[in-house]
């Protein structure tokens, strides 16, 4: 054989090898196979796309390899990535798709879109045949599974040639300072029988460790379900949701009746703000039909809580935030930047306070700090207070809240003396029930402090640090116990700081005080946002209670 022939043979083998490796992915996708030719088409400020090692394997996703991209700080609101498929998605086994997501923040909208690239382009050049669903993340910096029910999209047709996936992170919002990296894995579709019922929930013994065939039959003639029998391949370790009355055959010799995949009685949660997460305190039970304005998933209410009564105390006032607005008879707003009297609110804050950043829905008060232009500043938030409406001298105060985090973010739950309007600060006194100074090294620490006047500004404080996690992970209760002798600061009923207020120079602390809740951005205490800062940030307050 001539040298040229050998060279031609080598080239032919190279082309054949690459042809074999050029196969595009098909559903399901787990980003593990080196023989798949993944094509990632990024746009709108999404970059650094790659298949990388799993950043934090856990029980939700322990796969070695995952897909990631970074949404840059200059990204557009519609920045994302498209992934062409080798063939159309087979929706014969179900129109519910799921995806493992690792997000740097909770409550980030993940828009999952499927497109038919053979359809004519729309006016923006995108395929005109598509379906899309947006689901917010629940967790941050850990894997979770998001479920996308394409049956709920008005234009969805399972027979369309959906041959491309498109993923948008934080859809509708531009990039944040420093950009954010997102990870994705395990994209698949599966059975969804009842649109009123979650797809993948814990059904105990019906989770198996081996793949097997599954046959389900509906024995309820009045159920109204379109499908009466279903045959699918059961994937190891998954869990199934079936309407009451379905009987399930797993393999050749296992046969059982699943009465219902939903919690019994089924609980629906009121979702007043339409964010997909409901009020854990306002529920409807006992029906499989979804009531209007209700959802299956409650807002994550995990964390510490305290009772509504204590021995030797009476509950004299509380706000449980159980209306869909702030109580105007109790709360009012500090607005703007404090000018001309106290520009920067005395702390060189770089924020504009406005009422719309404080909302009450689903039995929670939410104060949100945003990066947006207002009043000549790049950040907005809310600062609410009870001055002139509710003030207290002595007692136990409990405030249950989930806090924000990140460099330059400064949430506070605090009190000022009602005399501030006549004698000013610090002579009026200040009790900081909770302050958190956002930052990678301080998101796990809160501060409790008193300020007063003794021939000048004087303060005395202590701090409490979590042994695991940060205060943004779940709810905690921040308390003071205040009497004529001392003030104690507590986190989750653990005392971490005490001040003796019997000396005459601390007379400020024997007068009525009112509440202030706010998130500041920047200032003397926290410093200022930098490339690591993540916004928006939320402080969510469950209740404030005063006992005397």
Image: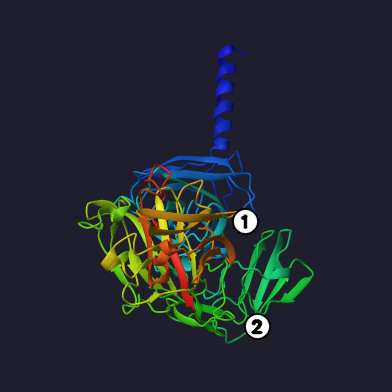
Is residue 284 left or right of 2 when viewed as pictured? Answer: left
Q: Nearer the viewer, mark 2 or mark 1?
A: 1
Identified at 35% across, 45% down, the residue is 75
> Element type at marker 1?
loop
Identified at 38% across, 55% down, the residue is 536
Please tell me whether residue 524 is drawn above or below residue 144 in the rendered image: above
> Element type at marker 2?
loop
Q: Nearer the viewer, residue 105 or 537?
A: 537
Residue 294: percent from the left, percent from the top? 46, 77
Residue 356: percent from the left, percent from the top? 30, 66
Rendered image: mark on residue 219: 2
The residue wearing badge 1 is 60
Residue extending furthest toward the right: 253
Identified at 50% across, 67% down, the residue is 480
Residue 68: percent from the left, percent from the top? 50, 44
Q: CA distance from mark 2 to mark 1?
A: 33 Å
Please tell me whether residue 171 is drawn above or below residue 289 in the rendered image: above
Is residue 32 left or right of 436 when viewed as pictured? Answer: right
Is residue 219 left or right of 205 when viewed as pictured? Answer: left
Rendered image: mark on residue 11: none
Residue extending furthest toward the top: 3
Q: Residues within 10 Å of mark 1 (few under 14, many from 20)?
A: few
């Amino acid at each position: 054989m001539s040298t040229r022939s050998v060279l031609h043979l080598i080239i032919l083998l190279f082309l054949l090898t690459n042809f074999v490796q050029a196969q595009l992915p098909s559903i399901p996708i787990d980003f593990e196979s080196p023989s798949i030719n993944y094509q990632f088409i990024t746009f709108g400020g999404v970059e650094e796309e790659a298949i990388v090692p799993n950043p934090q394997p856990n029980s939700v996703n322990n796969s070695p390899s995952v897909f990631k991209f970074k949404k840059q700080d200059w990204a557009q609101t519609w920045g994302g990535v498209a992934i062409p498929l080798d063939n159309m998605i087979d929706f014969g086994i179900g129109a519910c798709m799921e995806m493992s997501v690792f997000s740097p923040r909770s409550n980030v909208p993940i828009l999952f879109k499927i497109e038919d690239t053979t359809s004519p382009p729309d006016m923006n050049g995108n395929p005109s045949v598509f379906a899309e669903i947006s689901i917010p993340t629940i967790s941050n910096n850990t894997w979770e599974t998001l479920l996308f029910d394409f049956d709920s999209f008005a234009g969805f047709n399972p027979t369309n040639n959906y041959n491309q996936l498109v993923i948008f992170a934080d859809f509708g919002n531009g990039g944040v300072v420093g950009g954010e990296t997102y990870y994705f894995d395990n994209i698949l579709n599966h059975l969804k029988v009842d649109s009123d019922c979650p797809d993948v929930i814990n059904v105990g013994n019906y989770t198996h460790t081996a793949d097997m065939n599954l046959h389900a039959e509906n024995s309820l003639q009045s159920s109204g379900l379109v499908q009466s029998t279903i045959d699918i391949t059961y994937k190891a370790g998954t869990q199934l949701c079936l309407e009451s009355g379905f009987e399930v055959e797993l393999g050749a010799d296992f046969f059982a009746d699943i009465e219902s995949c939903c919690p019994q009685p089924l609980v629906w949660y009121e979702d007043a703000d339409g964010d997909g997460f409901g009020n854990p305190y306002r529920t409807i039970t006992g029906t499989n039909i979804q009531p209007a304005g209700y959802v299956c998933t409650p807002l994550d209410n995990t964390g510490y809580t305290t009772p509504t009564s204590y021995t030797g105390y009476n509950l004299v006032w509380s706000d449980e935030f159980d209306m869909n607005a702030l109580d105007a008879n109790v709360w009012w707003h500090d607005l703007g930047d404090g000018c001309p009297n106290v520009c920067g609110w005395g702390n060189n804050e770089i924020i504009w306070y406005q009422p719309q950043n404080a909302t009450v829905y689903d039995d929670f008060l939410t104060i949100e700090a945003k990066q947006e232009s207002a009043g000549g500043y790049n950040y907005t938030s809310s600062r609410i207070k009870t001055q002139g409406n509710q003030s207290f001298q002595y007692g136990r105060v409990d405030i249950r809240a989930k806090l924000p985090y990140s460099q330059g973010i400064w949430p506070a739950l605090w009190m000022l003396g009602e005399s501030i309007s006549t004698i000013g600060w610090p002579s009026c006194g200040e009790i900081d029930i909770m302050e958190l100074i956002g930052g990678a090294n301080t998101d796990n620490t809160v501060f409790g402090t008193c300020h007063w006047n003794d021939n000048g500004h004087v303060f005395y404080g202590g701090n409490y640090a979590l042994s695991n996690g940060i205060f943004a992970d779940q709810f905690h209760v921040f308390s003071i116990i205040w009497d004529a002798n001392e003030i104690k600061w507590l986190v989750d009923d653990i005392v971490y700081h005490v001040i003796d207020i019997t000396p005459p120079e601390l007379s400020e602390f024997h007068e009525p005080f009112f509440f202030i809740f706010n998130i500041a951005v920047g200032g003397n205490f926290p410093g200022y946002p930098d490339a690591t800062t993540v916004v928006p940030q939320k402080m969510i307050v469950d209740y404030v209670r005063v006992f005397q």
